Image: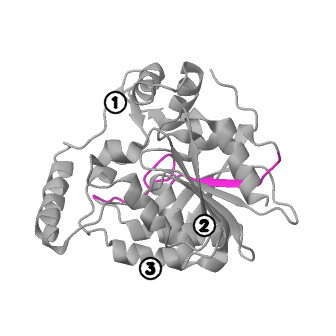
């Protein structure tokens, strides 16, 4: 099994009536800018361990499990709302760095949150790193009736247990699932991740630490015009990382393309795009050393 090189400490912070679980690597120090790292959909903060281990310098890293993921439990709910992630992040940053801006890294869904947050709280972000946080396809008002109807249907499906996540008979089974999803993930890392991505329940089954309610579609349409206005408000220098594999095209099959995403990035005043080879969407698992160098070079500038 993978052996972590840099020990993390686990703690809880009271954020918006929720006991937020946070992983911390390193210590605060004068002149050391906190590096806040937020994970993606159906992931956990521990997922950043490989990249943290690859950092050449010591950093004060703060990585929360989003509400309803990992060890952060939210109040009982059957749906999650994107603005809550912004509210949680705002208070997390205030908790750990009340008087100074931070460097913010986000992957996938976390990258989308990070981009939005940097536009609505520009003074709180010194440097911004977006790892494959592409945003959502453009929508039309005419899609609203069917979208909301689908949401109502999925709420009922969730109540019937039809959206429950698969359980596994062992941690090894979880590791196999991770490797099936990501063909580049080695067994050593997969078995390490499985211990943090899932937990054994009272019946001895291993359950993924993600609330199935996260699978319920958001009834609100994505408004690209609003997103672009927020992007235009970002003042922090931004590093946008994507992989040569182009997971965006694979997901949306032409409904939303990498070219459209690049067009949106033009709304930012200071952005650099880096493309990583031999990596899929879980780039922080596939190329942690390369990613660590990119991020360190960027945030230390």
Picture coordinates of residue 114, whole percent (x, y): 53, 64
Marks 3 & 2, CB-CB < 8 Å contact: no
| Few, some or many residues within 10 Å of mark 1 (<14, 14–19, 20+) | some
* Alpha carbon separation for disc pair 3 and 1: 42 Å
Q: Callout 2: helix, strand or loop?
A: helix
Q: Is residue 166 visible?
A: yes
Picture coordinates of residue 200, whole percent (x, y): 45, 30
Name the mark nearer the viewer: 3 or 1. 3
The disc at residue 11 is none
Marks 3 & 1, CB-CB < 8 Å contact: no
Above or below, comparing residue 70 to residue 144 in the picture:
above
| Few, some or many residues within 10 Å of mark 2 (<14, 14–19, 20+) | many
Above or below, comparing residue 270 to residue 183 in the picture:
below
Look at mark 1 in the image and give the residue it sits on.
167
- Residue at image point 18% right, 60% down: 151
Q: Is residue 85 visible?
A: no
- Residue at image point 51% right, 78% down: 232
The chief SS type of the magenta part is loop
* Alpha carbon separation for disc pair 2 and 1: 31 Å
* Alpha carbon separation for disc pair 3 and 2: 24 Å
Q: Nearer the viewer, residue 32 or 228?
A: 228
Q: Nearer the viewer, residue 248 or 189?
A: 248
Look at mark 3 in the image and give the residue it sits on.
229
Above or below, comparing residue 140 to residue 54 in the picture:
below
Look at mark 2 in the image and give the residue it sits on.
92
Magenta region includes residue 34: no
Going from the N terminus, do you reach mark 3 or mark 2 first? 2
Picture coordinates of residue 68, whole percent (x, y): 42, 53
Q: What segment carries the magenta color?
A: 57-78
């Amino acid at each position: 099994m993978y052996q972590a090189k840099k020990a993390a400490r686990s703690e809880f912070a009271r954020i918006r009536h929720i006991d937020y679980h946070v992983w911390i690597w390193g210590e605060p120090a004068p002149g050391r800018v906190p590096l806040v790292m937020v994970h993606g959909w159906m992931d956990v903060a521990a997922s950043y361990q490989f990249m943290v281990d690859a950092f050449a310098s010591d950093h004060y890293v703060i990585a929360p499990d989003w509400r309803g993921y990992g060890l952060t439990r939210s109040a009982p709910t059957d749906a999650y709302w994107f603005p809550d992630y912004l509210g949680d992040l705002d208070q997390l940053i205030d908790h750990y760095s009340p008087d100074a801006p931070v460097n913010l890294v986000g992957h996938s869904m976390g990258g989308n949150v990070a981009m939005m947050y940097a536009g609505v709280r520009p003074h709180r972000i010194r440097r911004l790193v977006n790892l494959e946080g592409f945003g959502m396809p453009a929508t039309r008002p005419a899609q609203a009736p069917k979208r909301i109807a689908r949401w109502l249907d999925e709420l009922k499906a969730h109540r019937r247990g039809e959206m429950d996540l698969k359980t596994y008979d062992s941690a090894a089974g979880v590791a196999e699932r991770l490797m099936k999803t990501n063909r580049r993930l080695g067994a050593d890392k997969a078995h390490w991740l499985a211990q943090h991505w899932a937990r054994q329940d009272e019946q001895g089954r291993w359950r993924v630490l993600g609330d199935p309610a996260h699978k319920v579609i958001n009834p609100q349409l994505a408004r690209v015009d609003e997103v672009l206005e927020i992007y235009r408000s970002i003042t922090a220098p931004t590093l946008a990382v994507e992989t040569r594999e182009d997971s965006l095209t694979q997901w949306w099959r032409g409904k939303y393309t990498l070219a459209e995403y690049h067009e949106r990035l033009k709304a930012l005043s200071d952005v650099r795009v880096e493309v990583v080879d031999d990596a899929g969407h879980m780039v922080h698992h596939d190329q942690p050393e390369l990613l660590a160098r990119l991020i360190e070079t960027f945030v230390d500038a």
